[in-house]
């Protein structure tokens, strides 16, 4: 297998915690997964998630709120559709993080056991 299973488990667990109608960025997921500074690893590991996991990949964005996919691409359109279905507004391939960024409270953070 081409990735660290422990890291994958931590990342996938954290991504699963992002609530409906909220988004996170790769760096936040890395930090909350105990892997600070490993934002690129998050993007890589997410590609290996088993489909039956139903990982809400579309809730994870670049640090500036931009979708990870090129504007107008099939994946960007799919991500935009999924986010819109949860009430998240995507404008010009970007989400307003001031409005939609997930900011877990202490209870959520304490509940993030791996």
Image: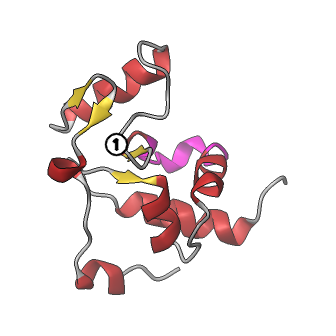
| Residue depicted at x 52% and y 50% | 53
| Residue depicted at x 49% and y 66% | 13
- Reply yes or no: does residue 56 show up in magenta: yes
Q: Quadrant of the N terminus?
A: bottom right
Q: Residues within 10 Å of mark 1 (few under 14, many from 20)?
A: many
Q: Position of residue 12 (x, y in %)?
A: 53, 60
Residue that extends furthest to the front in the rendered view of this protein: 64
Q: Position of residue 79 (x, y in %)?
A: 38, 29
- Look at the magenta stretch and give its main secondary structure: loop
Magenta residues? 47-57
**Along the line of sight, which residue is nearer the eye, 98 or 114?**
98
- Left or right: where does residue 35 sit relative to residue 113? right
Q: Quadrant of residue 94?
A: top left
Task: Please give the residue where the numbered disc 1 appears in the rendered image.
Answer: 65
- Left or right: where does residue 109 sit relative to residue 84? right
Question: Circle 1 — which element?
Answer: loop
Figure check: 76 above or below 111: above
Q: Quadrant of residue 82?
A: top left
| Residue depicted at x 76% and y 65% | 4
**Along the line of sight, which residue is nearer the eye, 53 or 82?**
82
């Amino acid at each position: 297998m081409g990735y660290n299973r422990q890291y994958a488990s931590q990342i996938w667990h954290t991504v699963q915690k992002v609530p409906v109608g909220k988004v996170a960025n790769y760096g936040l997921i890395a930090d909350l997964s105990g892997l600070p500074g490993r934002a690129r690893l998050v993007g890589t590991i997410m590609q290996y998630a088993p489909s039956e996991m139903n990982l809400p990949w579309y809730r994870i964005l670049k640090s500036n709120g931009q979708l990870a996919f090129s504007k107008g691409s099939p994946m960007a359109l799919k991500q935009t559709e999924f986010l819109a279905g949860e009430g998240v507004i995507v404008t010009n391939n970007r989400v307003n993080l001031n409005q939609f960024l997930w900011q877990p409270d202490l209870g959520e953070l304490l509940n993030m056991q791996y």
